[in-house]
Amino acid sequence: MDALSEVLRHARFAANVTLDVTAYAPWCVSVPASEAMGRAHVVLAGACLLRAGDGETAQLRAGDFVFLPGGQAHLIGNTMEGQATPLSSLVRTPVEGELLPVRLGRGGAPTRWISLTCTFERHMAQPLLGALPAVVRVNLSGAAPLEWITGGLGLVLSASDAPLIGAAATRARLAELVFIEALARHVQATGGGGQGWLAGLNDRFVGRALALVHGRPSEPWTVERLGRLVGLSRSALAERFGQVMGEPIFAYLTAWRLTLAAEALLTSARTIESVARSAGYESAGAFSSAFKRVFGKPPSVWRRKRRR
């Protein structure tokens, strides 16, 4: 299992399609900020603009996927001037699993775009979120998941049709595939030569080491053993990991183990001592001190306040 897949799995990543819009110029939609979810848009036909906060205005064309992982407020439209239509006024509750298409504006050049949302446990997704820019833009032209979701949205019930069985679940899975394809392309587009988590995923040896520690975090790893499994000597892996990731292997592994421990405290009834052992600590006291340095509060307080 690769590190990106493991982070998404532990973060309980989920996505869905919220809007299928054909908009006719002139048009502009305001999307509110949301701490609970990330938002994305995919242009299926035509072109439009997107501006987040006081940032630059991005030009989007057919096939472009744009993702705002922080859920910040933004505008999308063929113009950024004039009064914007609130996104909430366009959203319709799906009828019998069918996402009804929305029509906006009149007369001008048409643009078809879909709006997606995704949810995740932010503290679990931090390796990824901390490495992404405020606005991720990827072209998905020709990508199979985009073709699948476009074809799925084209199915509209007639008055005599029975409900499409499993339509909502299918649409959600396709939305997740679109997100994953876009994230994978963004990672690949970063190329080599940089530093950080995305650069690590792209590196032949560091990427393998990340996959191992994410896939089996509780194993008693040593740098020598990891090096043997990825095809480098102990010293060569330690040097390469530090150069690419900007931190030593065990600093990264410790941080990931603590992140998993934070999740275990929220989702299980295990004792703090048990969670501490899984995180590689021999005593609950040492675990508590390390946990407080990272999360700002001791494990018992974290568990109580986050659950509440």
Image (spheres, rainbow, N blue to C red):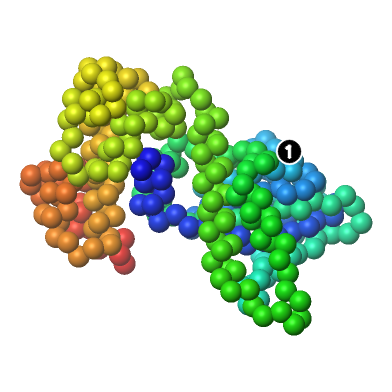
Q: Which residue sits at x=63%, y=43%?
A: 143
Q: Is residue 51 above or below residue 263?
A: above
Q: Which residue sits at x=72%, y=41%?
A: 60
Instruction: Please tell me whether mark 1 sits on a helix, a strand or a loop.
Output: strand
Q: Can the viewer see residue 34?
A: no
Q: Can the viewer see residue 217?
A: yes
Q: Is residue 22 above or below residue 96?
A: above
Q: Quadrant of residue 213?
A: top left
Provide residue 7's location: percent of width, then percent of height. Answer: 38, 46
Q: Which residue sits at x=41%, y=32%?
A: 201
Provide residue 131's location: percent of width, then percent of height. Answer: 45, 36
Q: Residues within 10 Å of mark 1 (few under 14, many from 20)?
A: some
Q: Which residue is mark 1?
A: 59
Q: Which residue sits at x=20%, y=54%?
A: 299
Residue type at mark 1: give it.
Gln
Report the side of 151 relative to 172 (left or right): right
Q: Quadrant of residue 170?
A: bottom right
